[in-house]
Amino acid sequence: MNYLLSIGTAVPPFKHKQSDILSFMKASLPPHKEKEKRLLDIIYRKSAIAQRHAILPDFTPAFEKSLLFGPEQEEAPSLEKRMEVYYKHAADLAAKAAYRCLGDFDKKEVTHLITVSCTGLSAPGLEIALIEELGLPTTTFRTGINFMGCYAMFHALRQADAICARDPEAVVLIAGVELCTLHLQQDDSEDNLMANAIFADGAAAALVSHNKKGFQQPLKMNEFHSQLLLKGKQDMAWHLSSKGFLMRLSSYVPQLIKEDIAHWIHGIIDQAFPYQTKEEIHWAFHPGGPRILQNIGTALELPKEALGHSYETLKSHGNMSSVTILFVLKRLMDHPKNKSFPIFAAGFGPGLTMEGLTLVYSEQ
């Protein structure tokens, strides 16, 4: 069994109130789009988000200069322009999270690096930039996980777990960064208006090893689980285009999760934690949006406070795609209410994919 030793998180410098982003989005619509503006009011009021961070200053009037989406822009930014911003900022933000994750740990002990991002890619890629920035050994084995969407961090943790199971001396650093706001699309379809209302930018890093390495609050990773809901294949998707990455986020996704998640989770919990009640489990769900969290709570018959860490992450940061689950898990590491309770974490993404992970506090 391997340990999740530490988590570090980072957000970009521009913090936008959800109300300011709403004003920006409404102003970007033509004057005759009154129906769409009313819909925006409803979506943002129900978003459960207070603020979001972005690498772009564009969405708040207080920041005078815009990079991609200012009123002076006559057409949608090209993919090249969006990627220029990604290349300039992604590695620095990921490195910030990695430094916080590593703390005083000797970087020379890191043997493997896994990078995660679905909002930009290149070759040489993020992993090489981080080896140089962090001063990791040039012999570090490296892997890039790209374009898998919101569940990608579970795949990275599973890869790290497999590496450490094969080599007990391995120390794996995972570094993820998502700059979702670069791919804002200024069209007025309902799916697009919903996507623009929840996605944000952020970075997170995790350190995984077979040994505790002196860390005081590690989590033991137990079992990984995966379930593909092919009936939702077209309801959550992510595609490249000349004007950026296009997100397909159907309003049917929360219902799909609600229909299938209870049976899936109960099967996992009954096997992993047969002696725990639902009240004796810490729940860490990827906050894909308020309706997803609400439907999970309904399906599992859990009160809202049982999903408190997910709701608080959504409120403070929005949906930062793959890295968001590490923000939720960090809250559980930093503020453990009862270390005798195990943890169930889950995320969702294109496919439609459900990924799960069970963990326990290291004292157990």
Image (cartoon, rainbow, N blue to C red):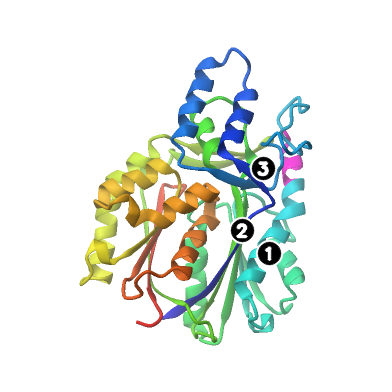
Which one is earlier in the sequence, the residue at label 2 or at label 3? 3
Q: Which residue lies under the disc numbered 2?
A: 203
Examine the structure image and report whether residue 60 is included in the region drawn in magenta.
no
- Residue at label 3? 182
Could you tell me residue 328's position as x and y percent? 47, 60
Q: Which residue is drawn at 64% across and 30% down?
A: 24
* Residue 41 locus on image (x, y percent): 50, 27
Q: Element at badge 2?
A: strand
The label on residue 96 is 1
Three-letter amino acid code of the residue under disc 3: Leu
Q: Is residue 307 left or right of residue 94?
A: left
Characterize the magenta stretch by its predominant secondary structure.
helix
Q: Which amino acid does label 2 sit on?
A: Ala
Q: Can residue 285 be seen in this view?
A: no
Q: Give the range drawn in magenta.
A: 77-83
Q: Answer few, some or many: residues within 10 Å of disc 3's Cα (few below 14, many 20 plus, some between 14 and 19).
A: many
First of labels 2, 1 by sequence position: 1
Residue type indicated by callout 1: Lys
Whether residue 278 is visible, yes or no, is: yes
Q: Does residue 70 sit above or below 113 in this rendering?
A: above
